[in-house]
Amino acid sequence: MARTLEDKLPPDNPLRAWPFWDGPESHNLDALKALEWLEAFILTMDAELPCHENRDTLWHVRQAIKSQKERIIRRKEQGVYGLGKPHNFTVIDPYKDGD
């Protein structure tokens, strides 16, 4: 049996109870919306308790937001955005040495 996104969260994570898991009252949470929320949350935390870790986290979250926006552009260009179908992409492994 496939696990739902909700089931993949730790049991004590309060997001498990939020209404965005494909129900009639859901908010249709997607990766980009989640990352944008996380960016706002970390910015708020950093304003109150600034630290290097918050700034580092922001950099990574912003890179992830950029990647998701690029994904959306590619999916729209390929005519599969919003259809739940795969899109063509080239896998680039930054850890591969080029061989």
Image (cartoon, helix red, strand yellow):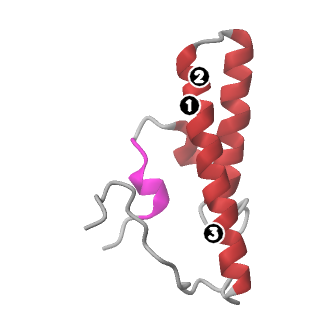
Which part of the image, by quadrant, shows the N terminus? bottom left
User: Which disc, if any, is residue 57?
Assistant: 1
Marks 3 and 1, the one that precedes in the sequence? 1
Quadrant of res 84: bottom right
In three-dimensional space, the C-alpha distance between marks 2 and 1, rounded to whole angstroms, equals 5 Å
**What's under tag 1, amino acid-wise?**
Thr
Asked if marks 2 and 1 touch (Cβ < 8 Å), the reply is: yes
Q: Is residue 65 magenta?
A: no
Residue at the image position 66 percent from the left and 79 percent from the top: 75
User: Which disc, if any, is residue 17?
Assistant: none
Q: How crowded is mark 3: few (under 14 residues within 10 Å), some or many (20 or more)?
A: some
User: Which residue ends up furthest to the front in the rendered image?
Assistant: 99
Percent coordinates x, y for residue 22 in the rendering: 62, 68
For the record, the magenta segment spans 4-10
Q: Does the magenta stretch include residue 9?
A: yes
In three-dimensional space, the C-alpha distance between marks 2 and 3, rounded to whole angstroms, equals 25 Å
Percent coordinates x, y for residue 4 in the rendering: 44, 64
Percent coordinates x, y for residue 47 in the rendering: 74, 15
Q: In this view, does 95 lie to the left or right of 16?
A: left
Q: Is residue 15 above or below residue 44?
A: below
**What's under tag 3, amino acid-wise?**
Arg
**What's under tag 2, amino acid-wise?**
Asn
Residue at the image position 59 percent from the left and 61 percent from the top: 21
Which type of secondary structure does the marked residue at label 1 adopt? helix
Residue 46 seen in the figure:
yes
Residue at the image position 43 percent from the left and 72 percent from the top: 91
Q: In this view, does 50 lie above or below 33?
A: above
Which type of secondary structure does the marked residue at label 3 adopt? helix
Provide the residue designation for mark 3.
Answer: 71
Q: How many marks?
A: 3
Provide the residue designation for mark 2.
Answer: 54
In three-dimensional space, the C-alpha distance between marks 3 and 1, rounded to whole angstroms, equals 21 Å
